[in-house]
Image: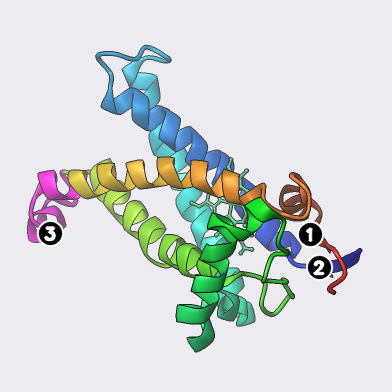
Amino acid sequence: MKRVYLHPVPVRIWHWIHALGILLLVLTGFQLRFADHLHWISFRTAVVVHAWIGILVSLDFLLWLGYYLGTGKIRVYLPRAYDLLKGAWKQARYYAYGIFVGEENPFHPEPENKFNALQKMTYLAIMGLLVPLQVITGILLLNTGKFAGIIEALGGLKVVDAVHVVLFYVFAAFIIAHFYLASLGPTFWSHFKAMITGWEEEPEEG
Ligand code: HEM
């Protein structure tokens, strides 16, 4: 077994706050969206918990941004020319076929290149576009009076709310797909363990 140090401490702290935070946001989001049918907690409690956790996740996003921009390690999120076609195809083929017939994962993570082509594209879209959009629309919805001018300029409350709700469904679906894909390491738990200890265990090549 080869051991590679993939996730430094700030990344692990950021990730688990983010994971728990988004999970709670999705659950309270369901309560808010389907208040007539669900009675997990009161509507008022759901509003307050959703708002405070939203603020926590937004601050946590700044931790991710500060760390990755500050260290220049944001490069690990940027797909290279190879990733866009060949890398993405190889990885998709592995997930759709190779894994079921016992083929070796074509990608081997290194600290400077820790994501496969599909992870780079997905994580970049999530962290570079969707989380910021969700944070911005969430902040606007937090005080619709104060931000009335900006909301109007963006097309009105319905548009801002629709973006926030569509992204809520995207995150709910992402968590499920992310959990499944994260379980496809050398063993079921290896990627989860790596996100806790920082160290990924990889079978020797060849
Ligand atoms: C129950 C919830 C979650 C679990 C169990 C989980 C698990 C994991 C694991 C095991 C990894 C490392 C393997 C890999 O690189 O794919 C990882 C990485 C990552 N996860 Fe999650 N995750 C969860 C929620 C989330 C959420 C809600 C987001 C974002 C909306 C997210 C975004 C990411 C990103 C961007 C990475 C790469 C982190 C980096 O190294 O910079 N995860 N996750």
Q: Does the residue labelled 3 lie within 8 Å of ligand 1?
A: no
Residue 54 point in image, percent of width and height: 42, 43
Callout 1 crowding tier (Cα within 10 Å): few <14, some 14–19, many ≥20: some
Q: Which residue is drawn at 69% across and 80% down?
A: 112
Decide if residue 126 is on the left or right side of residue 82: left
**Amino acid under disc 1:** Gly
Judging by the rendered image, the residue that carries numbered circle 3 is: 154
Residue with the mark numbered 2: 5
Would residue 173 be visible to someone looking at this image?
Answer: yes
Which residue is depicted at the point 74% across and 44% down? 188
Tag 1 residue: 198
Q: Which residue lies furthest to the front in this view?
A: 101
5 lies left or right of 131: right
| Mark 1 or mark 3, earlier in chain | 3
Location of residue 52 with respect to 203 vertically, above or below? above
The quadrant in which residue 43 appears is top left
Indicate left or right for 87 with 41 as reference: right
Query: In the image, which residues are magenta?
Result: 145-160
